[in-house]
Image (tube, rainbow, N blue to C red):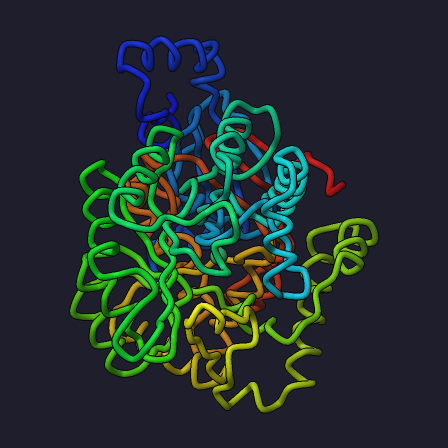
Amino acid sequence: MRDERIHGSRLIPPALVSLLVFSLCGSADAQDAVTAIRAARVIDGVGSEAIDDGVVVVRGAEIVAVGSADDVSIPDGADVVDLPGHTLLPGLIDSHDHPTLRPDSLELQPMIDQRMAPGEEQMLRAIRNMRISLLGGTTTVRVTGESSGIDFRLARAIQDGVIPGPRIIAAGMPIVATSPGAGPLWPTDGVESIRRRIRENVLGGARFTKMYLSDTSPTTTILSREEVCAAVDESHRLGIPITSHVVGNWGVSIRVALECGVDAFEHVRPITDDIIDLFVEHESHLNITPLIFIAGGIRWSPEMWRRLDNEMTSVEEWIDFNRATIQEARRNNPMGETEDRPQDVFDIAEAGAVDFTPGIRPYQARLLEAHRRGVPISHGTDTLHGTLLLNIEFLVEGGFTPMEAIQATTRVAANGLGLGMGDRIGTLEPGKLADIISVEGDPLTEIRDLAKVRFIMIEGRRLDPLSFH
Ligand SMILES: [Zn+2]
């Protein structure tokens, strides 16, 4: 049975929803099909240890049993999938991505050009990018801002099986002030236009609101406090959470957003001791995009993407290429490891907004501090689709255990989506949707084994027979 909270448009009348659900469910056979997946170990995402010699039993779209082979009996007639040497784990969640975009020089104009391209062109990129994400083990992508309803159409096409891809949680058009970063399509200035955009988004299928805030002075952020609070009020009034991009030199954007009641925070700069205190106090969720942040010095180009798309033959190679590129950029910029430096990703100074890029090591230390103090931290690839593993490696390098970094990508990320999603995905537990992947090897002892994704299931459907190209 499809979960209306996850899939259904909010605006379809309940009677029609039951008709749709009835027709979508297909035959009783498919709904009741039972699969038992056996592997060397199971990371259920709940406990701190893996279950050795584990089994996950799936009936229809849901998990019905998880445990060791000694404890779980496999129902008669079940389709048994044996994965010796593999680790089963919950499907990964990319908590911040823009499927239509690819980094191109990391400057503003190429990004705006991609946004301004005809919708069909943007959709072609999105389809390719989401295939890579899926084959990299990502089963849910939280899409933090797209134009022209592309994310809504993408979500529906994937849901209906027109194209393969991870589940899409879409925000629609973001809330953003007139500024260079907004480009020509996006600005929402004034309370009325903000409320209207949120209503239009919800009508289109938005599951949350995305807002952009950058510090403009030691006491101001780019939208007025009144505008920020109105965005929060309208989102909550319509029953959806709101998250905000918050960057800057002084932490004003973070403070204003927290005071207005924003639910989650993207990127999050600066992270100081004071800011960590505020996150603890407000019990707020921190969603970081470390890869795109450390990739700041890389000159991404269409030629690099051509190589990735045409010369790589698997997601492992795709990830290896990106890892090597980032490692080289880090070697070439030793100062970036330890020292804060002026913002070098997007030049937003023209808008009066100020950002800075923290040194990688101090940033990691602050994240670890926030994590140890109980701040939920998840992460997203933010246009470097399919490379969640490199974020996970970043967290492990910063002191997270491999299990903690995996949970930041599964259970913690699911809770961060709001909408009760933490009750449906993010762990392997009876009653949850069967979003399951396997990797060859043991990522708890060798984190890079997470690139060896072999088995992929979303809501009980196998997607791993897909080819990379
Ligand atoms: Zn983003």
The residue lying at 57 percent from left, 46 percent from top is 99
Q: Quadrant of residue 323?
A: bottom right
Q: Indicate left or right for 455 with 240 as reference.
A: right
Q: 311 or 120: which is nearer to us?
A: 120
Q: 427 or 67: which is nearer to us?
A: 427
Q: 224 or 103: which is nearer to us?
A: 224
Residue 56 spot, x, y in % from top left: 45, 39
Looking at the image, is 264 positioned above or below residue 464? below
Quarter of the picture holding the C terminus: top right
In this orientation, does residue 122 appear? Answer: yes
Q: Quadrant of residue 213?
A: bottom left
The residue lying at 60 percent from left, 32 percent from top is 164
Looking at the image, is 441 positioned above or below residue 188? below
Residue 359 spot, x, y in % from top left: 49, 84
The residue lying at 52 percent from left, 65 percent from top is 391
Residue 360 spot, x, y in % from top left: 50, 81
